[in-house]
Image (cartoon, rainbow, N blue to C red):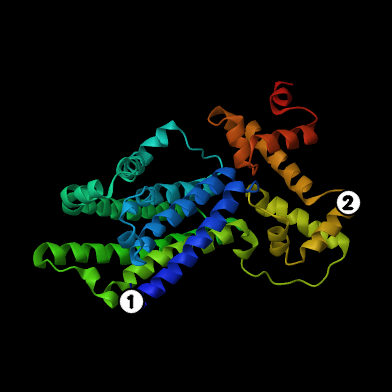
């Protein structure tokens, strides 16, 4: 069996993209720092796209042709990518957002897609051949590809509109600009694949001409699939290392301890970067324009850790929001997320450490 050069290139890039998505996806599923829900959504997105791209890789590499019993195994999750990306972006920019039962309709079509492939994926090769001739080739593939185009571009557009309407604060600006670039890049690659799919429908429907029989003509489509995996894998890596998203700060000359301590307090009080659950010591030091060890040294001399300092500001922000009446339309846990905490356990520990009592007892008193 010979494989054309365009397919070899696409296979190599797709294989690397699949490996990248799987590795970073598993890391995100196990990650405890930052926004846990965002970690899970992006991790699941990476793993499901890696499986979906594997479906194309098996076809390009001739694996399906050689082992026909593997056709239609349930590894195609293309319809889940749009909703997962949208809810990842939403959970990243709205810390108090949580997936609830009312959001389940967004995942009905992805579930039906999975159940369909599950129902035929482990049947005989003869049955799969019949399903292809009678169901998928004349109807199913056009319905599935049409839904993919509508859902992917629709959810990407919704994510972009949500990001476009949010004011850029000092610490939020770089994160939102990164998310917008992420969204636009994904939309561009999906537009390439969508254009090819629509053109193939027209050519095949009116002229019975298969666009994908021309190796180099179909190459950009296959490249766009691999590009999506590389893009989301790379941006997921950036998501885990937020300091890489921040622009290079102007490095300031070494300051005396009192001066740097004042700069730390001013940054926290004026710009409130502690509201970001993803804030790390490295990112905080980059905002200050100094090395992370310098910040740690100054805080240690004051008998405080970076995490303790940030949580103290978050607890004070939580108390302020409750005193302003935010609890009238938000739960205490939602207010804690808005204050920068990433879990109920970390919030309760920090609140009790700072005030000496649990949140409910504090406000009852």
Task: Please provide percent x and percent y for residue 24.
Answer: 56, 57
Work out which quarter of the rendered image holds the C terminus and state it. top right
Q: Establish if 88 lies above or below 221.
A: above
Quarter residue 201 falls in = bottom left
Q: Is residue 216 left or right of residue 13?
A: left
Which label is found at residue 302? 2
Q: CA distance from mark 1 to mark 2?
A: 65 Å
Could you tell me if residue 168 is visible in this image? Answer: no
Mark nearer the N terminus (1 vs 2): 1
Task: Please provide percent x and percent y for residue 145.
Answer: 27, 54
Q: Are the two marked residues, 1 and 2, in contact with CB atoms closer than 8 angstroms? A: no
Discs 1/2, front:
1
Q: Which residue is mark 1?
A: 4
SS for dot 2: loop
Viewer-closest of 75 and 69: 69
Q: Is residue 301 left or right of residue 172?
A: right
């Amino acid at each position: 069996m010979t494989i054309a050069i365009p397919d070899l290139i696409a296979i190599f890039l797709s294989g690397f993209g699949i490996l990248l998505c799987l590795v970073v996806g598993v890391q995100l599923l196990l990650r405890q720092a930052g926004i846990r829900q965002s970690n899970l959504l992006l991790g699941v997105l990476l793993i499901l796209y890696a499986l979906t791209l594997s479906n194309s890789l098996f076809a390009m590499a001739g694996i399906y042709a050689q082992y026909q019993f593997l056709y239609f195994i349930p590894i195609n999750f293309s319809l889940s990518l749009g909703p997962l990306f949208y809810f990842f972006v939403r959970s990243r920019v709205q810390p108090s957002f949580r997936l609830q039962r009312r959001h389940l309709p967004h995942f009905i079509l992805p579930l039906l897609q999975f159940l369909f492939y599950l129902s035929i994926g482990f049947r005989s090769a003869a049955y799969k051949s019949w399903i292809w001739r009678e169901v998928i080739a004349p109807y199913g593939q056009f319905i599935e590809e049409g839904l993919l185009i509508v859902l992917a571009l629709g959810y990407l557009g919704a994510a972009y509109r949500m990001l476009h309407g949010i004011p850029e604060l000092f610490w939020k600006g770089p994160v939102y600009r990164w998310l917008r670039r992420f969204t636009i890049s994904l939309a561009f690659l999906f537009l390439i694949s969508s254009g090819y799919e629509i053109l193939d429908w027209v050519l095949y429907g009116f002229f019975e001409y298969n666009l994908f029989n021309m190796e180099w003509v179909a190459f950009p489509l296959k490249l766009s699939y691999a590009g999506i995996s590389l893009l989301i894998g790379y941006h997921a890596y950036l998501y885990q290392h937020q300091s890489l998203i921040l622009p290079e700060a102007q490095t300031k000359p070494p300051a005396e301890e009192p001066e740097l301590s004042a700069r730390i307090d001013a940054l926290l009080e004026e710009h409130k970067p502690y509201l970001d659950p993803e804030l790390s010591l490295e990112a905080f030091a980059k905002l200050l324009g100094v090395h992370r060890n310098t910040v740690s040294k100054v805080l240690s001399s004051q008998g405080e850790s970076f995490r303790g300092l940030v949580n103290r500001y978050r607890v004070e922000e939580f108390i302020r929001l409750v005193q302003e009446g935010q609890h009238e339309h938000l739960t205490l846990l939602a207010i804690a997320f808005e204050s920068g905490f990433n879990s109920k356990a970390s919030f309760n520990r920090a609140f009790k450490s700072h005030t000496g009592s649990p949140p409910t007892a504090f406000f009852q008193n």
